Image: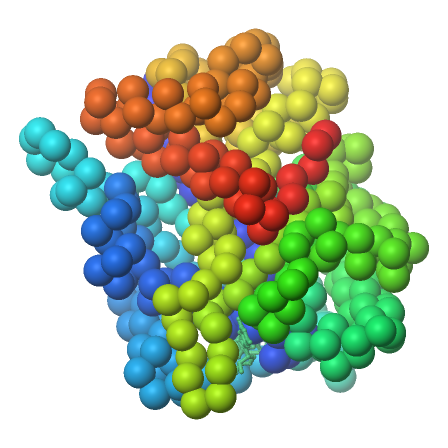
């Protein structure tokens, strides 16, 4: 059985206070994907399914690139962006590219304002809870930490970090009591919460390990509180991780009078993070949970998105999945290190197996980022 279209959809939610760089990040992600430099070397192209929305992002990007103009703030609006990943003509040596949508990325841009100001009316609280509930479809969430604020508070970063964590926690707790008043829990909920250092270009000396160490040293306790608060949304909270993965992000090199959009950090990891990061963790969690349970099934559905293309497995029965994937993971490519993945990637290219090549390419991108100390993946 072919996996359904929906199963190929990966969702990511990005949280950050107002001014932390969310809109610039989205614009850089999309704008850079339309540049010839990207297209020439990429197997796939990315396009926004909503053309007008896509053009707005592209316009933001070009404004930065050509005239060092930053996009207007949109602190009040929550928006969902949908991107299609399609095969590029250059990606196939023979025959025609299918041109069909192979993978879909849904990016939830959460309004920064909401993290800072409490809702003023019950309607407002309800609206926020409704928006939050849309994010529940996401597999991964990124919580932004603003390098600019770390710089401003150099030496006493805990001043900023404690306030930031407290904001996240308070906000989440209010939303939860609105969304799940009777202490219900959700089977589907983002279960991998990553910390992202936004505007990482401002702290060029900081690698991802140092970023993690700074957070744990200064606000380890507060991270635990947020983890408890968020885990309380999820059914089977054992299958939940926060603050175990870290990534450095910079949308461009910002200099006075110039924004160099060719110098990004981590932006091209967003798609691999959304598609591949939850994979092995989902499989591991699903194995540990009651097989066939609601949560295990949800986890496997997501894991299946990526894995179903690797090696042409037959993934029809939902419950069979756990067993199939477990053996798959413990044996072939994914846990066998970069060289094996590289080999499988090249084979997929030879076979013109586009999707497998793209997904394995994502895994290689993540491996490279770990090596370059831009990404830290949970060892669990
Ligand atoms: N140095 C540096 N500055 C950045 C970067 N990204 C954003 N900025 C700066 O931060 C400002 C705010 O970025 P936005 O993307 O608009 O912030 P936002 O998170 O969307 O804020 P709201 O819309 O208010 O929630 C920009 O105008 C830039 O000046 C980055 O990667 N590096
Ligand atoms: Mg914005």
Q: Is residue 344 above or below residue 165?
A: above
How many numbered marks are there?
0
Residue 75 percent coordinates (x, y): 58, 80
Residue 83 percent coordinates (x, y): 36, 55
Instruction: Residue 353: name its quadrant.
Output: top left
Quadrant in the picture for the C terminus: top right
| Residue plotted at (45% across, 35% down) | 364
In the drawing, does residue 190 fall left or right of residue 73?
right
Instruction: Residue 320: name its quadrant.
Output: top right
Q: Which of 319 and 197 is in front in this view?
A: 197
Q: Is residue 19 above or below residue 93?
A: below
Q: Nearer the viewer, residue 240 or 128?
A: 240
| Residue plotted at (61% across, 53% down) | 247
Residue 93 percent coordinates (x, y): 12, 32
Q: In this view, does 190 lie above or below 159?
A: above
Instruction: Residue 13: name its quadrant.
Output: bottom right
Q: Which of 127 and 211 is in front in this view?
A: 211
Quadrant in the picture for the N terminus: top left
In the drawing, does residue 193 fall left or right of residue 325?
right
| Residue plotted at (27% across, 62% down) | 34
Residue 23 percent coordinates (x, y): 50, 73
């Amino acid at each position: 059985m072919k996996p359904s279209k929906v199963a190929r959809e990966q969702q990511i939610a990005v949280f950050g206070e107002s001014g932390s760089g969310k809109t610039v990040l989205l614009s850089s992600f999309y704008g850079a994907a339309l540049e010839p430099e990207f297209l020439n070397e990429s197997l796939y192209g990315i396009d926004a399914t909503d053309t007008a929305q896509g053009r707005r992002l592209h316009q933001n990007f070009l404004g930065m690139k050509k005239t060092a103009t930053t996009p207007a703030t949109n602190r009040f609006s929550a928006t969902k962006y949908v991107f299609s990943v399609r095969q590029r003509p250059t990606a196939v040596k023979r025959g025609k590219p299918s041109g069909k949508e192979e993978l879909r990325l849904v990016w939830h841009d959460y309004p920064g304002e909401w993290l800072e100001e409490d809702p003023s009316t019950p309607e407002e609280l309800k609206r926020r809870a409704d928006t939050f509930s849309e994010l529940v479809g996401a597999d991964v969430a990124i919580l932004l930490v603003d390098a600019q604020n770390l710089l401003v508070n150099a030496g006493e970063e805990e001043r900023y970090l404690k306030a930031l964590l407290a904001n996240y926690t308070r906000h989440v707790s209010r939303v939860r009591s609105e969304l799940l008043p009777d202490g219900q829990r959700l089977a589907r909920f983002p279960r991998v919460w990553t910390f992202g250092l936004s505007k990482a270009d401002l702290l060029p000396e900081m690698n991802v390990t140092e970023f993690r160490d700074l957070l744990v040293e200064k606000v380890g306790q507060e991270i635990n509180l947020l983890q408890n608060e968020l885990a309380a949304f999820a059914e089977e909270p054992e299958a939940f991780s926060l603050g175990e993965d870290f990534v450095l992000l910079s949308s461009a090199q910002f200099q006075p009078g110039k924004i160099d959009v060719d110098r990004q950090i981590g932006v091209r990891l967003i798609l691999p993070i959304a598609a591949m990061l939850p994979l092995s963790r989902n499989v591991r969690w699903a194995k540990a949970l009651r097989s066939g349970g609601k949560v295990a099934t949800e986890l496997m559905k997501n894991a299946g998105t990526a894995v179903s293309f690797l090696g042409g497995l037959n993934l029809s029965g939902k419950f069979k999945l756990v067993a199939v994937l477990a053996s798959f993971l413990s044996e072939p490519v994914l846990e066998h290190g970069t060289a094996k993945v590289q080999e499988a990637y090249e084979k997929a290219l030879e076979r013109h197996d586009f999707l497998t090549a793209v997904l394995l390419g994502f895994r290689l991108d993540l491996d490279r980022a770990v090596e370059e100390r831009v990404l830290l993946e949970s060892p669990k």
